[in-house]
């Protein structure tokens, strides 16, 4: 039996419904996902004597199958009533991803974005066990918000270490910039040769980028026309995760990102 019997979904615990994770007699604890398993594309060289790696992609998100039941009373399995089944379906079976946190050691700061499909395991017309097919939004889990608040002036810098398990780049969930002088603002990151440009900024203006949506506190500033659409991002390699950030104007920045976590459910 697994060491965990509870989870939180969209802010509510399974145990709040008088339920726990379980397994049918004779079945495996869980049908586990292989985790962040990439697919490799190769190209033959030298008449097939050598192959080079042409690309890597993730074809499937994390998935798993698990079972829940009502907490036994004096060791006796309890039958689900129709109102209880309806309430559980209303909570779990929704056409959108929501935050799932497994209540197990080491997962205190990790979550998944998940959706469920539910089927009933019946015995003589009564339901004692519910099977949940879990599908997530990503091959990875996510760490809870990592927040950085800092100030920059021309010639200065601020360092963020991208602690994601997956090498590559990662866009902040939210980037909020408060300009302290007017002018064209350029943001750079030492990890990549990219320049993020916001033109025509005013002193006191607050520019927000959230989930690739751009907005400004000044209604008169048509920020989309003054943006080069090079979104600021963090990056890391296997050997380096030090992102040194610089700005061409005095600014205050609030950056929130969710590092990628390689986990198996």
Image: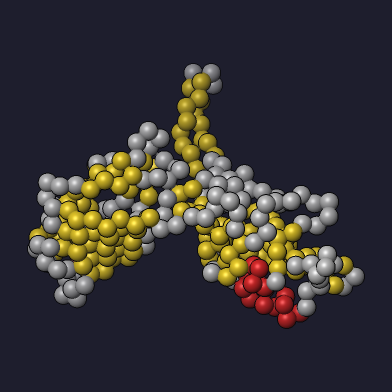
The outermost residue toward the bottom is: 83
Q: Quadrant of residue 183?
A: bottom left
Looking at the picture, the colour scheme in use is secondary structure
Q: In which quarter of the image is residue 101?
A: bottom right
Q: In this view, does 30 lie to the left or right of 104?
A: right
- Total marks in image: 0
Q: In this view, does 172 lie to the left or right of 198?
A: right
Image coordinates of residue 264 in percent, x first then y, are 59, 47
Q: Nearer the viewer, residue 18 or 229?
A: 18
Image coordinates of residue 50 in percent, x first then y, are 51, 20
The outermost residue toward the left is: 182
Q: In this view, does 173 lie to the left or right of 9?
A: left
- Residue drawn 9% across the image and 63% down it: 182
The outermost residue toward the front is: 74
Q: Which of 33 and 44 is in front in this view?
A: 33
- Residue drawn 78% across the image and 74% down it: 80
Q: Quadrant of residue 25?
A: bottom right
């Amino acid at each position: 039996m697994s060491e965990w019997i509870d989870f939180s979904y969209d802010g509510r615990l399974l145990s709040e419904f008088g339920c726990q994770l379980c397994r049918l007699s004779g079945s495996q604890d869980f049908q586990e996902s292989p985790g962040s398993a990439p697919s490799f594309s190769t190209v033959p060289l030298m008449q097939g004597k050598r192959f080079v790696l042409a690309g890597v992609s993730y074809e499937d998100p994390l998935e798993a199958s698990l079972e829940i039941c009502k907490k036994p009373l004096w060791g006796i399995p309890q039958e689900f009533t129709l109102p209880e089944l309806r309430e559980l379906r209303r909570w779990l079976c929704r056409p959108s991803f929501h935050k799932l946190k497994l209540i197990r050691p080491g997962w205190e700061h990790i979550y998944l974005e998940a959706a469920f499909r539910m089927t009933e395991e019946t015995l003589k017309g009564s339901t004692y066990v519910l099977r949940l097919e879990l599908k997530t939004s990503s091959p990875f889990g996510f760490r809870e918000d990592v927040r950085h608040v800092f100030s920059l002036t021309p010639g200065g810098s601020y360092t963020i270490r991208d602690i994601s398990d997956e090498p590559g780049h990662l866009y902040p969930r939210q980037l909020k910039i408060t300009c302290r002088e007017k002018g064209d603002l350029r943001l750079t990151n030492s990890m990549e040769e990219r320049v993020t440009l916001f033109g025509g900024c005013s002193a006191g203006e607050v520019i927000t980028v959230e989930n690739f949506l751009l907005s400004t506190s000044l209604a008169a500033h048509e920020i989309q026309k003054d943006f080069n659409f090079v979104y600021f991002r963090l990056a890391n390699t296997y050997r380096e995760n030090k992102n040194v950030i610089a700005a061409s104007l005095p600014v205050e920045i609030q950056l929130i990102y969710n590092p990628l976590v390689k986990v198996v459910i």
